[in-house]
Amino acid sequence: MQRATPVVLNLIIINVLMFAAQNLVSGFDITEWGALHYFLSNEFKPHQLITHMFLHGGMSHLFFNMFSLFMFGTMLENYIGSKRFLVGYMICGLGAGLLTQLTIPYSADMFAKSSEGLSAASKYGISIAEVVMAYKNEYSMIGASGAIMGVMAAFAYLFPNTEMFIMFIPIPVKAKYVIPVFVLIDLFGGINPAPGDNIGHFAHLGGALVGFLLVYFWNKTNRKTFY
């Protein structure tokens, strides 16, 4: 455990304040305004590529994201510096949003073919194509998870042998094994979404990919051994 570094601390404060505003401000829907919509939807605005990563869907969503940011981001910011950490964090969030945009058509098709999508088509008397269109129009995403997955991927690359305790696993596991498993879980979840799954798997993958690439190129002259 370390004291939160400046950027990590300020990111946590901003996220907490935004969550408070989501729940306390009346007369203006901050969540709908800031959530990331599909770029072909009438609800899409360019600012959403940034604002979505500072909004959350509930207290547990906020807590686990901020706890992860504190645990991984503090050590990473100390290592690469505050300016580079902030730039990397924001780029990872953008990467998460952009990959999500690219994969929304796939997610819409998968939903339309699922039991939920078929049930909706039957209930409202619409075609599968109309279900796909409705999914794209109604899609929205919030959360810092994509940016934080980028932080975690960068952490695993720079500190691969750091031992971590994972819930329900009685022995410490090195970061170079834990983070790739999380990525594989998101890959599987994105390709084969479970019924009712509202996790942004592709956002996580986008953030993780960008985070890994950033530290790979930034650290190219000082590469750490994976082993």
Image (cartoon, grey):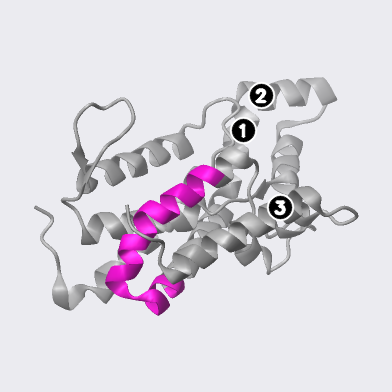
Q: Is residue 84 left or right of residue 192?
A: left
Closer-to-camera residue (219/123)? 219
Instruction: Answer whether residue 36 is visible to the viewer in this image.
Output: no
Distance between mark 2 and mark 1 Cα atoms: 7 Å
Q: Position of residue 28 (x, y in %)?
A: 86, 57
Question: What secondary structure is found at the residue carrying circle 2?
Answer: helix
Q: Amino acid at mark 2?
A: Glu
- Disc 1 target residue: 111
Quick check: is 75 in the magenta stretch? yes
**Where is residue 30 shown, x and y percent of the image?**
77, 56
- The stretch drawn in magenta includes residue 186: no
Residues at marks 2 and 1 touching, judged by CB atoms closer than 8 Å? yes
Counting from the top left corner in percent of width and height, residue 139 is at 69, 46
Which kind of residue does numbered mark 3 sit on?
A: Ala
Give the mark toward the camera: 3 or 2: 3
**Number of numbered tags placed on the structure image:** 3
The residue at the point 19 percent across, 30 percent down is 171
- Residue 20 is marked as 3
First-in-chain label (2 vs 1): 1
Which residue is painted at 60% across and 58% down in the image?
Answer: 15
Tell me where the magenta segment starts and ends, as one range: 63-87
Front-lying residue, 146 or 68: 68
Q: Identify the mark at residue 116; answer none if there is no mark.
A: 2
